[in-house]
Structure formats: C-alpha cells, structure tokens
C-alpha cells in the first residue's frame, strides 16, 4: 500500500510521523515542494496549480491514497485535487474540524494558524458545517521559531503566551466559552507542550497532524494490504523540489528521526 503525503515544505512531516505507527507495513511517499514555498504568499490559482502538479507526481509514483498535509493547500486546493484523481484524498483541515466536533462540549472553539490559512477562513467554514463556532487567530512568528529549532526556548514560550492571551481575550469579548484549541498548522505539533501550558486545563489542545493520521488509519483499516500483520516495517521515500541537504537536516526535527536520503525532483515553475 503506497500512501502519498504532500506539503509545501517540512511541516507535513509531523503528519507522516503520526502516520508511521498507525499504518505499519505501508510505503510512504513524502513530497516537500521546497522550491516553491511558501504557498501562503501565492494566489489561489497558483496554489492550485502547484498542488495539482505535486499530487500528480505522487500518483505517478504509485500512490493509492493521498494525504494533503499542508493547511494552505487543504484550504484552497482540496476540491481541485479531489476532482483530478480517483484515489481517496484526505486534507488536514477537515480532520482537525472533525476532531474538534467530537471533542467540544460548548461547541465553541479556538483555531490558530498561519496568515494564509486563517485568511482563508477554511477552519471557520469547516467548523460551521459541523455545528461549531470558531474564533481564529494568525500566529505568524511561530513557523520561523520552529524552523529555527526553538521548540523549547523561553522566547517561543513567551510568544505563544502573548498570542493565546490575545485570543482568549477576544473570546471573552465575544462572549464565547471555548473548550478546544485546534493547532491549524503542521509546524505547531512541535509546540504542543507549550500550547497546553499556556491555556487552562479545561481547554483541550487538538493536534491536526495526529487527527489526520488517526482518520487516515480509520479509513484504511480494512484495506487488505494493511489488515494483516506486516512482515516488514513501514518504508519511506522522501522527495524535495529544492535543497535536499537542508530538507534532510531540518526535516529530521519534524519527523523525529534521521532522514538519510532525499531525492531531488523538478516539477517546473
């Protein structure tokens, strides 16, 4: 069973990290479109074009199931990706919203993410479809702090405290009673302990990467290639469209283990 995982860069490796123990025996194909990141600064039409070319590459490699481990692509290109293929496609926004709907008792939740994801209001829309009211906030400083490796740094903890204090104040002013915080960026799972420390114990923190992996495993649970005990561990092939050395070095932080080989691919402009 070949499972394609796609992101504009490194953050989607947290989704792959969560998938590995849940789908033993699968072969994972991870593509980081590092030559064209960040997607968030591009127009919707460009993001759709990039996402379609990246997913086509994974399909050409034999992917039988696609995980769009990129919040921007999930927000702006998921419909087009699904229309372009007959294999199942799972995005990270719908899974985070599903988990929030299953978790929240008050039906009022908080969402944090990048500028592009929050500006799309994709989480708010997905939550609304599930009977939830979402208050969203962009936290643009967090991605560069994670990529700098400052995942347990006091500066990062202070930035998180400021962002979440502002968000909770906004919730109070809007007379909301949130009991769930959705981490709407695949970089943020590396900051989850700090997030949990910055909010009240009554607020559950949902890692959309873990939620996506759990839902993928549920969808694939009956697949004949995965239903028997595997005779080998999961295998991973890594592809990047630029800077394979940097991808291996930085990606290891997100994956939680060494990345020994990254294949360079050219998907055009």
Image: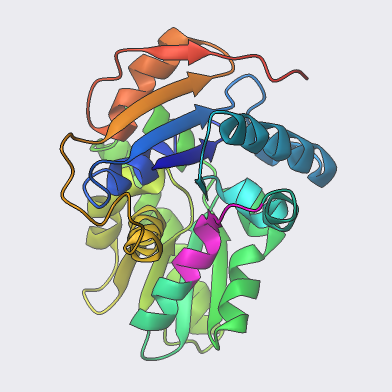
- Residue 240 seen by the camera: yes
Q: Quadrant of the N terminus?
A: top left
On the rendered structure, is 165 left or right of 257? right
Against 83, is 154 above or below? above
Residue 45 pos. (x, y %)? 84, 43
Q: Is residue 156 magenta?
A: no
Residue drawn at (47%, 38%), measured in percent from left and top?
143
Against 252, is 133 above or below? below
- Residue 115 seen by the camera: no
Front residue (pair 52, 151): 52
Residue drawn at (51%, 29%), measured in percent from left and top?
31
Q: Quadrant of residue 142?
A: top left
Which residues, given as a range, are shown in magenta? 86-97
Q: Is residue 90 magenta?
A: yes
Residue drawn at (36%, 90%), measured in percent from left and top?
105
Residue drawn at (39%, 64%), measured in percent from left and top?
215
Residue 90 pos. (x, y %)? 53, 57
Q: Quadrant of residue 133?
A: bottom right
Residue 264 pos. (x, y %)? 53, 11
Residue 53 pos. (x, y %)? 71, 32
Against 108, is 11 above or below? above
């Amino acid at each position: 069973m070949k499972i394609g995982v796609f992101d504009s860069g490194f953050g989607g490796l947290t989704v792959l990290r969560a998938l590995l123990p849940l789908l033993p025996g699968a072969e994972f194909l991870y593509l980081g479109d590092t030559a064209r990141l960040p997607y968030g600064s591009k127009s919707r039409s460009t993001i759709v074009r990039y996402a379609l070319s990246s997913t086509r590459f994974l399909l050409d490699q034999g992917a039988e199931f696609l995980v769009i481990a990129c919040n921007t692509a999930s927000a702006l290109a998921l419909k087009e990706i699904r229309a372009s293929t007959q294999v199942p496609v799972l995005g990270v926004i719908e899974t985070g919203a599903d988990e929030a709907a299953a978790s929240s008792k008050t039906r009022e939740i908080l969402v944090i993410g990048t500028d592009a994801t929050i500006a799309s209001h994709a989480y708010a829309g997905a939550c609304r479809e599930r009977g939830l009211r979402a208050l969203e906030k962009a936290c643009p400083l967090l991605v560069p702090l994670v990529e700098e490796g400052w995942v347990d740094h006091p500066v990062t903890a202070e930035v998180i405290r400021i962002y979440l204090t502002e968000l909770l104040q906004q919730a109070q002013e809007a007379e909301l009673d949130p009991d769930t915080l959705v981490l709407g960026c695949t970089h943020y799972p590396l900051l989850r302990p700090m997030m949990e420390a910055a909010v009240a114990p009554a607020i559950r923190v949902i890692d959309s990467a873990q939620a996506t992996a759990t839902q993928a495993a549920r969808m694939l649970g009956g697949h004949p290639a995965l239903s028997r005990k595997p005779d080998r561990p999961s295998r991973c092939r890594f592809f990047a469209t630029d800077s394979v050395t940097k991808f291996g070095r930085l990606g290891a932080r997100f994956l939680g283990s060494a990345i020994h080989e990254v294949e360079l691919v050219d998907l055009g402009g």
